[in-house]
Image (cartoon, rainbow, N blue to C red):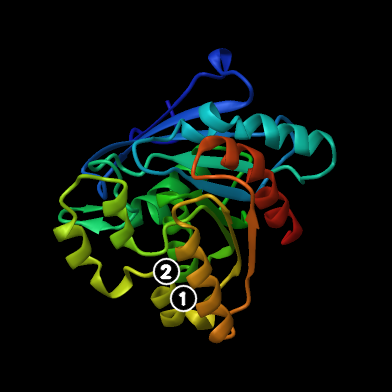
Amino acid sequence: MGASSDIAISDPRFERDNLRQITVISENLKGRGDISVFVPPGHDYESLPIVLLLHGVYASHWAWTHFAGVHLKAMAGINEGLLKPMVLVMPSDGLWGHGSGYMRHKDQDFEEWIISDVINAVTQSIKETSSRSALFIAGLSMGGYGALRLGAKYGNRIRAVSGLSSMTDARQLSDFSGDDLTGLLEENSTELSVFDTMLKYRNILPMIRFDCGTSDPLLEHNRVLHQQMLTHHIPHAYYEFAGSHDWPYWEEHIMKTLIFFNEQL
């Protein structure tokens, strides 16, 4: 078990590839939530940087590790000296419908689950982290939307943000999901757009980068966001690479995000 009766954590005897599994009882979820955590080996680490990696629709906490092998890439990057040791934290989105958008919905708050519950569970149960750990956030597709929006909103806590193939507005969820989004959109109506959220919180924005594949159906949305940010003089880095909206693209390019975060340390 973990640091409290509300946290269960995997037994190190049965863990593989430096991956730990955490289940948390969350008031924000009105139930349990799952988190996969990559912890680099080493006995003297403390207050390591925390990188939150958010998944897209249809998936859950295991997606980044079992579709992209991100933990293996991070370990290789650390061993090669490309990355400083860092902890990768990969939570479920809360498992509402096809995807929660990492927003509030009725009596569940998927935003607070990420920003409060997940971070608290990790710092309580992973001794290599603490409240002093630098925070970063990234994600793909719906997770890219969550990362860009939450990174902008909580820039006083999050040092840098990165989005891969990101939705740029919550209304784009309807292109990937058959869920009734009426309530979700109404409850978050003032912060549906990544750009509007950035304008609202522009005084605390962290370092921002995002990228998209040139064959991605979200490419034009990403180009519009890039131009909006240029017009309003919001510092950022934007890249386009060959590829589509799929795991081969995210597997190939996630290291660029980790290296970007590493550069902010």
How far across and how far down the image is residue 225, in percent? Answer: 49, 71
Residue nearer the viewer, 205 or 179: 179
Residue farthest to the bottom? 232
Residue 111 higher or lower than 30, as above or below: below
Q: Kindly identify the residue that appears in the image at 44 percent across and 31 percent down.
A: 22
Query: From this viewpoint, which residue is outermost toward the right?
Result: 81
Q: Residues within 10 Å of mark 2 (few under 14, many from 20)?
A: many
Alpha carbons under labels 2 and 1: distance apart: 6 Å
Q: Quadrant of residue 98?
A: top left
Up/down of 45 relative to 10, above or below: below
Above or below 259: residue 186: below
Task: Where is residue 47? Give x, y as percent.
Answer: 65, 49
Q: Are marks 2 and 1 in contact (CB under 8 Å)?
A: yes
Q: Secondary structure at mark 1?
A: helix
Judge whether residue 156 can be spotted in this image: no
Residue at horizontal 45%, vertical 81%?
199
Q: Residue at x 45, y 56 (%)?
A: 218
10 Å crowding of disc 1: few (<14), some (14-19), many (20+): many
Q: Amino acid at mark 1?
A: Met
Q: Position of residue 43 (x, y in %)?
A: 73, 31
The amino acid beneath tag 2 is Val
Image height check: is 22 above or below 12? below
Marking on residue 4: none
Disc marking residue 194: 2
Residue 3 coordinates in the image, percent (x, y): 45, 35
Classify the position of the N terminus by image quarter.
Answer: top left
Residue at which label 1 appears? 198
Left or right, 166 with respect to 73, comes to left
